[in-house]
Amino acid sequence: MITTLLAFLVTLGVLIVIHEYGHYRVAVACGVKVLRFSVGFGRVLWRRQRSADSTEFVVCALPLGGYVRMLDSREGTVPPDQLHLAFDRKPLRQRTAIVAARPAANLLLAVLLYALANWWGVEEPKSVMGPPVAGSVAERAGLRAGDWVRAVSDDGVQWQDIRSLTELRWEVTRAVLDRENLQLMVSDRDGHGSRRLTLELDRVEAKDLDAALMRRIGLGSPFSEPVIGEVRAGGPAASAGLRTGDRVLSIDGEPIVEATRIRELIRASGAGGQARPMVWRVEREGRSMELTVTPAIVVDGGQRIGRVEMVPGRPAELVTVSHGPFEGLAKAARKTWEMSTLTLSMLGKMLVGEASLKNLSGPITIADYAGQSVKLGLAYYLGFLAVVSVSLGVLNLLPLPMLDGGHLMYYLFEGVTGRPVSELWLERLQRGGVAIMLMMMSLALYNDVARLLGLH
């Protein structure tokens, strides 16, 4: 809990500071007087100001945002000798640059964070596939347990190397959202043989971007060798004579090539409500032997299933994914662009009803993911920070009043017509913007609570 809270506070602190610093830095560069740079809202906890005429830097009690307050004649009286320092007196191009600097800072931060993660490196499951879900897109394409996906392509001409299962899932997600088919270049687990497969993703519905989507496509867990892990003392597996390290060759005459099938057969053995003996053929120290395993019957989720009290399968093979200085930076820029377009695409699909509003997340989900990513390691946390930074940058570019994108729309109107938006329309648009933002925040918070209670 403490780790999650600290990770969440660090996440907010970094994103808010960078978000507002872009605004502040460009404002200063354009000759605008900045009165206050605030991290958070409400009661001031910390204050620093070098002189009465310089910028006041403050940290406030409510860390859910920040702001940069600039000298502006629309918000109060400005001495005549300082009018040239007021934001509203600056040329249109400078006001546009100052407002655009906030989301731009977040997108540049995402590039840096992705680059750092690429340079640092991370251990991820190798893109060797477990058994595809029966009847799924992957099974229809001809994907089999033990297939190693080496590269993917949109057009069959330009191929992109795949180094981990995480990269493969990202490419599949992108293809689903773009309603494109994806070609795979696969070999066996040892890299022998090569063949092309086509995942027909153009008709896959993607209302929710979650693990269930990958299961519908057929890309479940990574390949796990059918080698027995921990065997718990006194359980059915131990009583039958199974040992850690035994390789399962068959169960009731069915050949076993991957550990997922072991789990399925064990669970299915309890379907009749009574323990049913199972004949296991295993290999131990080069010798083959048969053992009779009688599972215990337990109730799980209202269903009777079999259980033998052992861990079936070895952990998935891991690969270290890292990149050199230039390659890591290039991939970071590409990933930031792809994440930005994916975020916009999802927002658009939610607006027209093609994607579920459940995909909208709030502070509780962010805090949870922050804590989980910290536990996984620095590279994972940097990647998480990058994702949130992209989301913040893209969200602020939406053409909604109260957001930077709304102000940029005002300036576009001013640039086209030669006159600013009237005060009357500004007031109306601001009210509408506040209402939309409150609805979005309420929905995000509702989704957070629903996930916490297991309703989503």
Image (tube, helix red, strand yellow):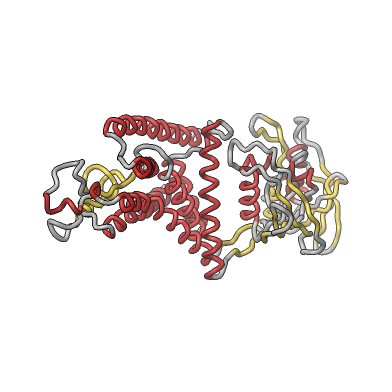
**Could you say where residue 309 lies in the image, as x and y percent from the top left?**
68, 46
Q: Quadrant of residue 423?
A: top left
Which residue: 79% across, 55% down?
Answer: 196
Tell me if 346 is positioned left or right of 216 in this view.
left
Q: Nearer the viewer, residue 292 or 339?
A: 339
- Name the residue at the bottom extreme: 325
User: For the point 66% across and 42% down, which residue is it?
Assistant: 179
- Residue at 69 percent across and 52 percent down: it is 154
Residue 322 location, quadrant: bottom right
User: 260 and 270: which one is in front?
Assistant: 260
Residue 258 point in image, percent of width and height: 76, 51
How many numbered marks, from 0 up?
0
The reply, left or right, for residue 168 in relation to residue 272 is left
One can see residue 241 in this view: no
- Is 31 on the left-hand or right-hand side of 109? left
Give the left or right position of residue 278, taking residue 414 as reference: right
Where is residue 2? Give x, y as percent: 39, 49
Q: Quadrant of the C terminus?
A: top right
Residue 322 visible in image: yes
Q: Identify which residue, 433 or 316, lies in the foreground.
A: 433
Residue drawn at 71 percent across, 46 percent down: 181
Q: Residue 17 at x, y = what percent? A: 33, 54
